[in-house]
Amino acid sequence: MVIPVILSGGAGTRLWPLSRALYPKQLLPLVTDRTMLQETLLRLAAIEDPGPVCCICNEQHRFLVAGQLHEVAGNVGSIILEPAGRNTAPAAAVAAIDALSKYDNPVLLLLPADHVIRDEQAFAAAVAAGYAAAESGSLVTFGIVPSGPETGYGYIRAKTGDPSATGSYPVLEFVEKPDLPAAERYIKSGDYFWNSGMFLFRADTFLAELDRTSPGMLDWCRKAYENASADLDFLRLDHEAFSSCPSDSIDYAVMEKTSRAVVVPLDAGWNDVGSWSALWELNAHDASDNVLKGDVLLHDVHDSYIHATSRLVAAVGVEGQIIVETPDAVLVASRDRVQEVKAIVRQLQHSGRVEAENHRRVYRPWGTYETVDLAERFQVKRIVVKPGAALSLQKHYHRAEHWIVVKGTALITVGERQITLGEDQSTYIPLGTLHRLENPGRIPLELIEVQTGSYLGEDDIVRVDDRYGRIADTPGADRPS
C-alpha cells in the first residue's frame, strides 16, 4: 500500500494577484476546472493500491483544503495542520510519524499540491518503478526528463548507464538552479534530470536517515506530533514544538547527505506552474499565440496571457505580456520577467497592504464575504452563508451592523432573542451585543451587511461559541467570523 502525502503549504507569490497568502495557487483552478490540489488528488487513481490520503497544510488554509479534498475524494486519512511553515523535511517527518502510528510501515508518496502532470499513466508507471526501490530501503526521487536547458529548475545528476532492476539510478548530486551555459552542458551530458520535488520512500527509512542527518529536526517533529491536538477533522501540531523545528527541504536535510538516494526518470508532461509564463505555455493558444481567460477583447496582440476575472479587459498592440485582472488589483508584466512578480508581493507585505494576503472575496468555513465599499466609519459587505452553516456567536466593541437579506432565509440571534428574516427584511445589531447569523434553509443565504463605527478592522471580533473550533485559534489568525 502507498500512502499519498500531499504537501499543500505554499503561498505561490509568483502568481499574484490570483494567488494570495490566504488563497494560494494550489487552491485555484488554473489549468482545468478543478483546483490544482484536486487534480493532484484525482491523479492518484492511476497508481496501484493508493491508501488513505494524508494532507499537510497551513492552519489558515484548513477549511478550504478540507472542503476541496472532500469534494473529490472519499479516502482522506489525515489533514495535519502546520502552525508555521518549516519547509518540506519537517512536513515529511510528521507524515511518516503519522503513518507509522496507523499502518505497518507503509511506503509514502510525497507530492506537492501545485504541479501539473499531463500523462497520468506515465506518472503511475514511474511510481510503480520506484515502489520496489523504496520497499528495498532506497529514498526515491523523481527526475523530470528535461526538454531543454532550463535555468528555473534545480537538477539531479545521476549515475546513468544501465539502470537497476527497478528502473532507478543512483543519485550523485543535487545541483542548484544553473546559468544557461551550465544548463546546456547538463542537457548535453544526458546525466541530469530536473528536480521535481516528488519523493517515494518507506516511512521508517526516511525517519532513520533524518535521525542520522538532522536529529534535532526529528526530535522537534516527534514532540510536535506527540503533543498535537484533534480539532474537528484536523490534527493540529503543537505550536511551540513545531515552530522550534529547523526549516529545511527534504533535499538539504536528507537527500544530499544519504547514500540511499536513487532517481526514477519521469517523462509525463510535468510542470510546477511556478510563474505566469508557465501558464501561458500550459494553456491552449489562439491563432496569435495568446492565452485568454474571461472577458477579453484584443486588437493586434500576440504571445500574451490575459486573464480577466471581474470585468472587461481590452488590449491593443502589445506582445509578450502578462495581464491579470482581479477585483482589487491588476498586474501587467513582460512575459520574460514574470519571476520578478514576487518583488511586488514583498512591497505589498512591507506596506502591510491586504492585497498580499486576501482577495476581496474571502472564504470561510461557513461561506464567503466580499467588501463592496469601504470609507471612514462605514463598510458594506456581501455575505453568503452555505445551507446549514452558521457564523460564530460573537460581539464587536467598535462597530454596529445592519443586515438586509436579499436571498434565502436567515436565523439571527441578537442578545437573548432569535428572529427569522426572509428576503427584503432587515435587522440591526447594536455595538457590543452578542449575535449569530445562521442559514436554516436549503439554498445559500445572501445578505448585505452595513458596518458603522469608529473601527472596522476584522480583529474586532470576540467569539463566544463557534462550531468550527476557531475560538482557540491564535488571535487574528482566522479573521473574520
Image (cartoon, helix red, strand yellow):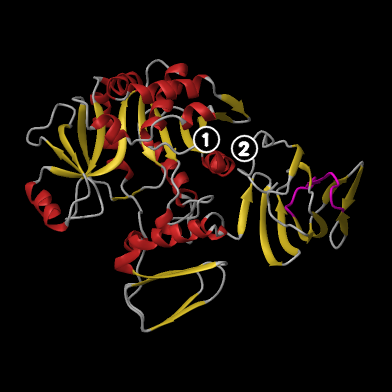
Quarter holding residue 265 = top left
Label drawn at residue 83:
1
Secondary structure under badge 2? loop
Instruction: Give above or below for 427 relative to 333.
Output: above
Spatial separation of the CA atoms under disc 1 and disc 2? 9 Å
Which residue is the site of mark 2?
Answer: 474
Q: Are marks 1 and 2 in contact (CB under 8 Å)?
A: yes
Task: Name the residue rendered at 8%, 51% in the picture.
Answer: 188
Residue 436 x/y as whole percent:
81, 45
Does the magenta run of residues contain 438? yes
Residue at 43% in and 62% down: 344
State left or right for residue 339 relative to residue 151: right
- Please state if 323 lies on the left or on the right of 424 as rendered: left
Image coords of residue 390 (percent x, y): 75, 43
Residue extent of the magenta highlight: 430-445
Amino acid type for the residue under numbered disc 2: Thr
Q: Residue 260 in magenta?
A: no
Q: Earlier in the sequence, mark 1 or mark 2?
A: 1
Q: Which mark is residue 102?
A: none
